[in-house]
Image (spheres, grey):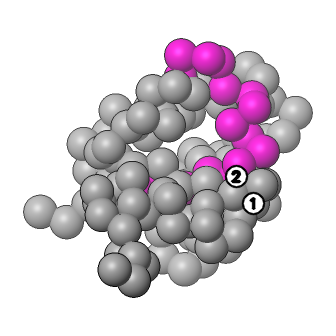
Amino acid sequence: MSQEIAVVGSPEFTTGFRLAGVRAFENVPDDEKSEELDAAVERVFDDEDIGIVVMREDDMEHLSRGVREDAETSIEPTLVTLGGEGAGSGGLREQIKRAIGIDLMDDS
């Protein structure tokens, strides 16, 4: 069974992914993130059809401690964050390594 990608964030953030064919998304306007982002993330992580959840790194600050910890340690679905300090290849490399359990870019 193939799983889907879901995107959580502001309508401006999710639009590009939707145009690329991502069908699962949660729009949370910037001015509502403090109140609504936890529930949106929980809905996506509870959906058994979702394999990868994409969010902006900056949005992680709006999550409650428990939801953030659950999202960051989840294996399935796997959280991928874009932007912020981990935006370089090192950050993405670590996310992929965490998701699949091996470092695909290891030269040894």
Q: Is residue 59 left or right of residue 46?
A: right
Kindly identify the residue that appears in the image at 37 percent across and 68 percent down: 103
Picture quadrant of residue 87: bottom right
Whether 40 is drawn above or below 8: the answer is above
**Residue type of the residue flagged with mark 2:** Arg
Question: 59 and 99: which one is in front?
Answer: 99
Q: Does 30 appear in magenta?
A: no
Distance between the alpha carbons at the discs numbered 2 and 1:
6 Å
Q: Residues within 10 Å of mark 2 (few under 14, many from 20)?
A: some
SS at mark 1?
loop
Question: 17 and 77: which one is in front?
Answer: 77
Kindly identify the residue that appears in the image at 29 percent across and 45 percent down: 76
SS at mark 2?
strand
Kindly identify the residue that appears in the image at 73 percent across and 20 percent down: 35
**Residue type of the residue flagged with mark 1:** Gly
Q: Is residue 87 left or right of residue 21?
A: right
The circle on residue 56 is: 2
Q: Residue furthest left?
A: 1
Q: Does 65 appear in magenta?
A: yes
Whether 27 is drawn above or below 84: the answer is above
Quadrant for the C terminus, please.
Answer: bottom left
Disc 1: which residue? 83
**Image location of residue 68, percent across then percent down:** 57, 28
**Image location of residue 6, percent across then percent down:** 46, 55
**Image location of residue 80, percent across then percent down:** 53, 55
- The part of the chain drawn in magenta is 52-67
Kindly identify the residue that appears in the image at 37 percent across and 37 percent down: 74
Q: Residues within 10 Å of mark 1 (few under 14, many from 20)?
A: few
Badge 2 or badge 1: first in the primary sequence = 2
Does any portion of residue 55 appear in the rendered image? yes
Disc nearest the viewer among 2 and 1: 1
Q: Are marks 2 and 1 in contact (CB under 8 Å)?
A: yes
